[in-house]
Image: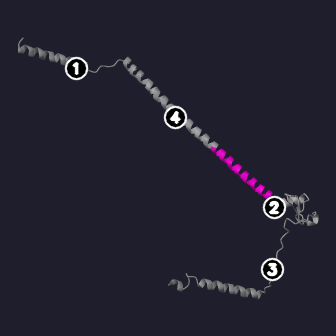
Amino acid sequence: MSHSQATTTGRSRLPRFAEAAVERARLTVVPPRALGRSQAARTPFAVLVLLLLAGGVVGLLMFNTHMQQTSFTATRLQDEVDTLTAQKQSLALELDGLRDPQHLGAAAQALGMVAPPEPAFVRLSDGAVLGNPTPATSADSVQITPGPSVKPPSIERRTVIVEATPEDQAVRSKRGQDAAQGSTADTPATSTDGDR
């Protein structure tokens, strides 16, 4: 085989090889079954994505609801704390009133107790009585609540009645008008000094 024969055979093979490559590279229509298979392969992924989205939305709604319930519970508990704090303060004020010496003295007087005129003491070491013990009587009772206060005469309000004649009223009204005109004459808007 000569060189020229080999070249012509190579040239004849080359177009056949190119034609075969072109035939293979041509686009062909995919049968409908193949399309269904690719969609079937994508369906589980799409379902998974939708399930994840639905789960996220449901979880977010549950979290939101839980936070609102917690907020309502905290508000209710704070209201209870405020109520109990007010009750505690009210009871503390009532207890202070009951511990007041005036209240204790009034309660003792209501029971018929009176303060002794001379106190006596018992020494516990030997049982000796110190002082002169005398029984108390109702005459020894002390007034615990103060009596009504009396105003001193120096601060009593005195009512003074002055009878005016029509002439006095005319003179007073004229003085009032003169005083009003004098005060308006000195205002900065009308006085000549105010313009400077």
Residue under circle 3? 154
Q: Position of residue 14 (x, y in %)?
A: 15, 18
Upstream in sequence: badge 3 or badge 2: 2
Q: Position of residue 186 (x, y in %)?
A: 58, 84
Q: Which element type, helix, strand or loop, lies under badge 4?
A: helix
Q: Which element type, helix, strand or loop, lies under badge 3?
A: helix
- Give the amino acid at mark 3: Ser
For label 3, count other residues whose C-alpha is less than 10 Å away and answer few (under 14), some (14-19) or many (20+).
few
- The question of residue 30 being in magenta is answered with no
* Magenta span: 74-99
- Asked which quadrant contains residue 109, the reply is bottom right
The residues bearing labels 4 and 3 have C-alpha atoms spaced at a distance of 85 Å
Residue under circle 4? 57
Give the overall secondary structure of the magenta segment: helix
Upstream in sequence: badge 4 or badge 1: 1
Upstream in sequence: badge 4 or badge 3: 4
